[in-house]
Image (spheres, rainbow, N blue to C red):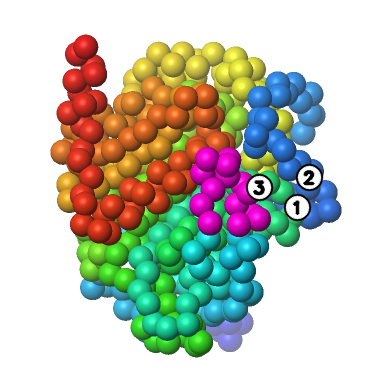
């Protein structure tokens, strides 16, 4: 009997253990799990190809790589197609957005003038009015799960001896890649030329603006890559970065700095950064309604991700990688790219910075895309053939803010082949149809990479007119009249 009792107890214990192992986590708990990015072999810094001229001459025609024998990497885990709505202002319960600050250097007016001479054409150089203090900082922003993450940024402040107020100019960088080694703030230390953003933002600070360049989410997180062209994440970065600047000064975290931020904010950005600037305006009314936004500037703005897939195929791997990782299985590389690009797709997209991507991937879509995807993309049939992917692309077409009080301006080059004048034209139409105050200027013979340099003085004039109370007259009537001539 004792043996039978022992056997009975053992069987009962086994049954209880089996039942415990079959208990499942509630489905709604899955949303709190951190999605793991697809595998990518991050190259060592010494293995990164250095090319400081590719951004001005990106048209070299690459050859497709040979077909490796290895199998394609596994598809990353899926997440919900519907992206979470950024937290409302009342839900942002955090004591401080600032994590750390560090003074870097003071840049003299003479040095700024010398830097300007290398970056701007002679017609767009204007003598520095101020020396500039440069700071590094880290601030907090919300990620897609509503968690606070650390974001790196650089701040440029006009140097003055007596207290004086200056407007803010918060700026978004253009495409540099999605790898952690491709962050725009690191282009100097990596010996690359991805936009010379420090010189660009210093030149605005020298004209009397407090400027800030934040990293996009992912560049400073070793567990993931940058979620490329995701409007809601760009918006939270731009808006939380602005709040962080005000907090810096309100809490006197920059001792010995006499400059103070005025109640006037301009958002700006180049290419992808222009997308982020307009995403910030779209989200401001519910995410940061307290911010006094006075205007938005777009330099060679890329507003429409679908158009970018058509007009700049070498950027498609970044887009497919990011949307697959962010939205889940709305698209697959196998549905988009020719077979010879698939075995190393994840490693290539996740490791190559933009200068390398332009050399590695072909500009000719027929050498990159599958015929079926090409037909859908260029034949306006994505809704029919890839409905979930089309929905994700539409989520991220910016410029849909109902706010008609904030004027916007678009500077664009007529020779831009990355965001073509046709895409610019359609974006102007979209903004005007929403009743916005829209200004725009097309520069003859200026390409994508030259737009910021060509429009420096024009952008200063536009912001200064607004600050002086001269609201720009919208060019929407002029735009629509030109369509009927």
Disc number for residue 134: none
Label 3 crowd bin: few (<14), some (14–19), many (20+), radius 10 Å: few
State the residue position of label 3.
118
Residue 116: in magenta span = yes
Residue 255 in the image, given as x and y percentages of width and height:
50, 87
Local secondary structure at mark 1: loop
State the residue position of label 2.
50
Q: Is residue 338 visible?
A: no
Q: CA distance from mark 1 to mark 3?
A: 17 Å
Q: What residue is shown at x 55% (from left), y 79% (from top)?
A: 101
Q: What residue is shown at x 73% (from left), y 43% (from top)?
A: 52
The residue stretch that appears in magenta: 113-127
- Indicate which disc, 1 or 2, sits on the residue closer to the N terminus: 2
- The quarter holding residue 85 reads bottom left
Residue 61 in the image, given as x and y percentages of width and height:
70, 21
Label 1 crowd bin: few (<14), some (14–19), many (20+), radius 10 Å: few
Disc number for residue 191: 1
Nearest the eye: 48 or 52: 52
Q: Is residue 414 above or below residue 292?
A: above
State which quarter of the image contains the N terminus.
bottom right
Nearest the eye: 223 or 80: 223
Q: What residue is shown at x 23% (from left), y 33% (from top)?
A: 475
């Amino acid at each position: 009997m004792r043996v039978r009792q022992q056997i009975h107890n053992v069987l009962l214990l086994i049954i209880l253990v089996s039942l415990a192992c079959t208990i499942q986590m509630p489905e709604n708990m899955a949303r709190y799990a951190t999605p793991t990015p697809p595998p990518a072999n991050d190259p060592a810094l010494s293995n990164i190809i250095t090319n400081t001229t590719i951004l001005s001459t990106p048209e070299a025609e690459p050859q497709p790589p040979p077909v490796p024998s290895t199998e394609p990497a596994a598809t990353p885990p899926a997440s919900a197609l519907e992206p979470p709505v950024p937290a409302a202002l009342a839900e942002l319960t955090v004591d401080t957005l600032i994590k750390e600050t560090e003074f870097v250097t003071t840049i003299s007016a003479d040095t700024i003038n010398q830097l300007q001479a290398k970056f701007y054409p002679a017609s767009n150089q204007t003598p520095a009015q101020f020396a500039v203090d440069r700071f590094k900082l880290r601030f907090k922003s919300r990620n897609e799960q509503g968690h606070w993450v650390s974001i790196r940024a650089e701040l440029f402040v006009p140097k003055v001896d007596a207290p004086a107020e200056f407007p803010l100019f918060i700026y978004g960088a253009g495409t540099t890649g999605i790898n952690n080694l491709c962050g725009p703030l690191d282009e100097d230390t990596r010996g690359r030329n991805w936009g010379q953003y420090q010189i660009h933002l210093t030149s605005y600070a020298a004209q009397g603006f407090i400027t800030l360049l934040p990293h996009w989410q992912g560049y400073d997180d070793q567990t993931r890559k940058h979620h490329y062209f995701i409007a809601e994440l760009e918006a939270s970065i731009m808006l939380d970065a602005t709040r962080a600047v005000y907090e810096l000064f309100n809490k006197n975290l920059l001792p010995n700095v006499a400059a103070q931020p005025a109640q006037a904010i301009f958002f700006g950005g180049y290419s992808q950064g222009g997308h982020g600037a307009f995403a910030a305006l779209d989200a401001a009314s519910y995410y940061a309604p307290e911010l006094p936004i006075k205007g938005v500037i777009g330099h060679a703005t890329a507003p429409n991700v679908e158009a970018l897939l058509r007009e700049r195929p070498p950027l498609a791997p970044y887009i497919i990688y990011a949307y697959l990782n962010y939205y889940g299985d709305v698209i697959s590389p196998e549905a988009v790219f020719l077979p010879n690009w698939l075995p190393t797709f994840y490693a290539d997209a996740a490791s190559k910075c933009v200068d390398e991507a332009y050399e590695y991937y072909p500009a000719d879509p027929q050498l990159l895309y599958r015929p079926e995807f090409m037909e859908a993309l260029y034949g306006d049939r994505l809704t029919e053939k890839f409905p979930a992917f089309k929905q994700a692309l539409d989520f991220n077409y910016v410029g849909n803010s109902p706010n008609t009080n904030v004027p916007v301006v678009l500077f664009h080059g007529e020779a831009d082949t990355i965001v073509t004048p046709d895409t610019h034209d359609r974006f102007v139409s979209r903004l005007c149809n929403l009743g916005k105050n829209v200004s725009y200027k097309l520069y003859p013979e200026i390409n994508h990479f030259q737009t910021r340099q060509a429009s420096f003085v024009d952008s200063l004039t536009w912001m200064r007119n607004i600050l002086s109370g001269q609201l720009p007259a919208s060019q929407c009537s002029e735009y629509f009249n030109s369509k009927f001539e």
